[in-house]
Image: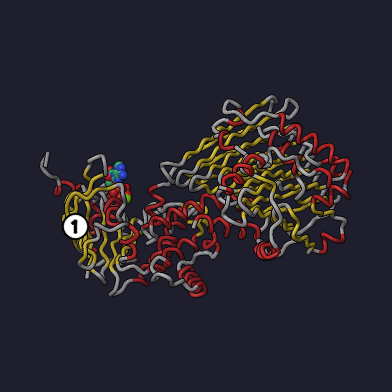
């Protein structure tokens, strides 16, 4: 069982600029796969393309979730099929309370005609919030509105804990977190690690990988995977930067 | 053969069907002092021209839609229906009092909270107030001019009015719970003229919630006036919940007068009606006075909400803050024209005016024309109107959590509109409005 990304080509809809250029990557259930890569290399684009964002057009390749292609699916269907994105920049939704938002997401997973049980729901929500050391006031506040950077990231992980996806893609969840928050968020993620779940963790900092220890590390450069290795690769990148890989990955002009 | 003759004879005899435009109201049943004024209003109604497309106050509006000929003064509703409507006249949990009208007839008048009885609060059906409270009526009843274009319809209201609520809160009295008034409109082609008059004396405090609703889906006509007089240091919260049938032509006309250090907060929730003209004028008449003018409209189908406002600062050191939010679906239209007027003496005015439209359909149309007329120095005024569609990134965020697109749209729309409710001080009121908005948005 895995989330398989095969030779994925994607460009900005209506503009033609290709951002993902033949990206191949497998996220296995039970594993944590880390992705690093320079700014602008296409990491967030990859996560949005996987989620089905309308800004991007797939021109080639496929994405299989446990063997079935998700490319024809709407973003909400992909989510219900078990995919989760923790956003690098979570959106603010004015006037919609966090609790109602997460409830609507869970309700959307219930069979037609069945109602989510409110007391169970809140019990679960509070339990996860406690784990993430989030104040209860965040249930009544509008989704992400006025949240600090770190609070937004915690809120992403809260949603992940509530929705229990099969595959979670965490886009720079560590950026903007203080040391304590990093520990707390990592605890949340680690609590979800297990045979029934796979993770793709996008980060710039090898420090995160001390907390969430990856099974594999890949480097994304120019819209494709330039190199893969063990956790040691992250340490090497930290020491050497990306230039040596960029040179390796350089391609002939007018490819 | 016979039948044909009969029919043609009857045809010849039938007088022109009486309508709210042609049939003189029943003045005889009103107190003598009031009768003269109603007669004068009737004449004024008849002599004033119908609005024309070229009138500045009717800019953007479809004046052809103002034909009143299909409507007749509403008849009484049956006993059975009265019982049904009484049972449906529940909005807030606890209230200080509840008054219910159907087709301009009083169905019930319940004083529920002790602070309404003990402290000399006068809260009466208008018909009774006309008789018993002549002084207050003469002083305050429709004492403000109709400044926003509907003088003709204000005159029509004044001529026909018989139902509504009159509230006088004496000096220093605070009524803790909201007072609730229901106006039902029932029967095809029926017309009602609901009136609300709130007079809050010095340092008093009160909240009134008017609920206007159609008892059935049929066409109807409502021409209401809600006037609010806030005395020195007093505070009035007024909420109008408009849920007429979606075939109703409605007018809601307001004048609010805010005295020294007084505050008025009004919120208009527009959910029903086919065409609704909603005029609100706040007069800031004493230093330290403040008026908050709020509106939430969820327009769908072919609904047209036409709102005109005036914030008029007549004294220095006064504040007004207007926030109108519209969500438009299908072929709906909204119109807003608003004016902040700062008189030469009104230095240190703080006046804000903001209109925000969320356009959910290509066929929907919002016209907004905010305006300023400033004749004083040292004032702080901002005004603006924005129109936007749904943010794709917000939609994607909600969808990425498994929420279907239609529901994501509903949530965002709901959030956009319901934010305005946060400006209300009373939680039960916020919850009630939230429920009604949910119902409308699906
Ligand atoms: N919708 C879009 N419109 C225009 N340009 C886009 C769009 N989406 C992505 N890009 C461009 O594609 C490139 C890849 O962007 P992406 O956000 O995927 O980078 P990233 O690897 O996540 O970078 P970072 O480490 O800074 O987060 C960038 O040059 C970006 O400007
Ligand atoms: Mg990124």
Q: Residue at x 22, y 53 (%)?
A: A220
Front residue of A205 and B161: B161
Residue B281, position in %: x, y? 69, 37
| Chain letter for mark 1 | A
Residue with the mark numbered 1:
A62
Is residue A39 in sight in this rendering? Answer: no
What is the quadrant of residue B177 in the picture? bottom right
Query: Height in image: B418 above or below B32?
Result: below
Count of marks placed on residues: 1
Seen at 82% across and 61% down, the residue is B115
Q: Where is residue B390 shown, x and y percent of the image?
A: 43, 47
Viewed as shown, does residue A194 lie left or right of B379? left
- In this rendering, would B204 be left or right of B59? right
Is residue B211 something one can see in this rendering? Answer: yes
Q: Is residue B279 above or below residue A130?
A: above
Occupied quadrant, residue A128: bottom left
Does any atom of ligand 1 lie closer than 8 Å to the CB of label 1?
no
Q: Residues within 10 Å of mark 1 (few under 14, many from 20)?
A: many
Location of residue A174 in the rendering, given as x and y in whole percent from the top left corner: 37, 58
Q: Nearer the viewer, residue B323 or B25?
A: B25
């Amino acid at each position: 069982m895995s989330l398989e990304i095969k030779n994925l080509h994607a460009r900005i809809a209506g503009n033609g600029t290709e951002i993902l250029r033949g990206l191949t990557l497998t996220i296995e259930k039970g594993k944590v796969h880390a992705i690093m890569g320079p700014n602008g290399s296409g990491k967030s684009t990859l996560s949005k393309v996987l989620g089905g964002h309308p800004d991007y057009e797939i021109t080639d390749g496929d994405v299989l979730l446990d063997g079935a292609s998700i490319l024809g699916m709407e973003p909400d269907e992909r989510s219900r099929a078990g995919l989760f994105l923790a956003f690098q920049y979570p959106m603010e939704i004015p006037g919609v309370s966090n609790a109602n938002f997460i409830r609507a997401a869970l309700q959307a997973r219930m069979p037609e005609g069945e109602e989510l049980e409110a007391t169970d729901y809140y019990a679960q929500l509070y339990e996860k919030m406690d784990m993430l050391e989030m104040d209860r006031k965040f249930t009544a506040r509008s989704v992400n509105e006025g949240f600090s950077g770190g609070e937004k990231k915690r809120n992403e992980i809260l949603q992940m804990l509530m929705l229990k996806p099969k595959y979670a893609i965490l886009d720079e969840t560590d950026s903007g977190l203080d040391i304590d928050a990093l520990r707390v968020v990592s605890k949340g993620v680690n609590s979800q690690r297990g045979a029934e779940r796979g993770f793709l963790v996008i980060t710039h900092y090898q420090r995160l990988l001390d907390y969430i220890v990856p099974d594999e590390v890949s480097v994304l450069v120019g819209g494709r995977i330039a190199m893969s290795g063990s956790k040691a690769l992250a340490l090497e990148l930290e020491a050497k930067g990306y230039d040596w890989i960029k040179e390796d990955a350089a391609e002939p002009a007018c490819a | 053969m016979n039948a044909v003759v009969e029919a043609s004879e009857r045809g010849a005899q039938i007088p022109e069907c009486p309508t709210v435009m042609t049939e003189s109201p029943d003045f005889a049943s009103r107190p003598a002092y009031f009768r003269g004024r109603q007669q004068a209003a009737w004449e004024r109604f008849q002599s004033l021209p119908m609005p024309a497309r070229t009138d500045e106050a009717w800019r953007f509006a479809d004046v052809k839609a103002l034909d009143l000929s299909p409507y007749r003064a509403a008849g009484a509703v049956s006993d059975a229906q009265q019982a049904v409507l009484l049972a449906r006249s529940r909005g807030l949990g606890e209230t200080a009092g509840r008054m219910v009208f159907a087709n301009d007839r009083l169905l019930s008048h319940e004083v529920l909270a002790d602070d309404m009885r003990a402290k000399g609060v006068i809260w009466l059906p208008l018909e009774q107030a006309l008789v018993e409270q002549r002084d207050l009526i003469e002083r305050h009843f429709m004492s403000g001019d109709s400044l926003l274009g509907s003088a003709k319809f204000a005159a029509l209201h004044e001529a026909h009015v018989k139902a509504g609520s009159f509230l006088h809160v004496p000096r220093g009295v605070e009524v803790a719970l909201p007072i609730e008034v229901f106006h039902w409109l029932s029967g095809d082609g029926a017309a009602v003229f609901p009136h609300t008059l709130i007079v809050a004396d010095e340092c008093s405090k009160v909240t009134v919630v008017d609920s206007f609703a159609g008892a059935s889906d049929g066409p109807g006509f409502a021409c209401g006036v809600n006037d609010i007089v806030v005395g020195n240091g007093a505070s009035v919260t007024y909420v109008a919940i408009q849920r007429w049938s979606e075939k109703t032509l409605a007018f809601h006309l307001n004048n609010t007068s805010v005295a020294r250090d007084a505050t008025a907060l009004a919120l208009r929730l527009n959910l029903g009606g086919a065409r609704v003209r909603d005029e609100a004028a706040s007069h800031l008449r004493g230093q330290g006075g403040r008026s908050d003018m709020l509106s939430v409209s969820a327009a769908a189908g072919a609904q047209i909400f036409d709102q005109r406002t005036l914030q008029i600062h007549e004294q220095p050191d006064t504040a007004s803050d207007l926030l109108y939010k519209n969500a438009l679906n299908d072929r709906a239209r909204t119109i807003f024209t608003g004016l902040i007027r700062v008189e030469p003496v009104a230095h240190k005015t703080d006046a804000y005016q903001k209109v925000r439209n969320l356009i959910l359909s290509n066929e929907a149309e919002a016209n907004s024309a905010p305006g300023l007329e400033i004749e004083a120095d040292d004032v702080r005024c901002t005004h603006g109107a924005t129109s936007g569609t749904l943010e794709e990134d917000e939609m994607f965020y909600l969808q990425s959590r498994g929420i279907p697109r239609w529901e994501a749209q509903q949530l965002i729309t709901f959030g956009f509109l319901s934010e305005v409710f946060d400006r209300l001080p009373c939680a039960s009121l916020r919850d009630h409005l939230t429920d009604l908005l949910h119902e409308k948005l699906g």
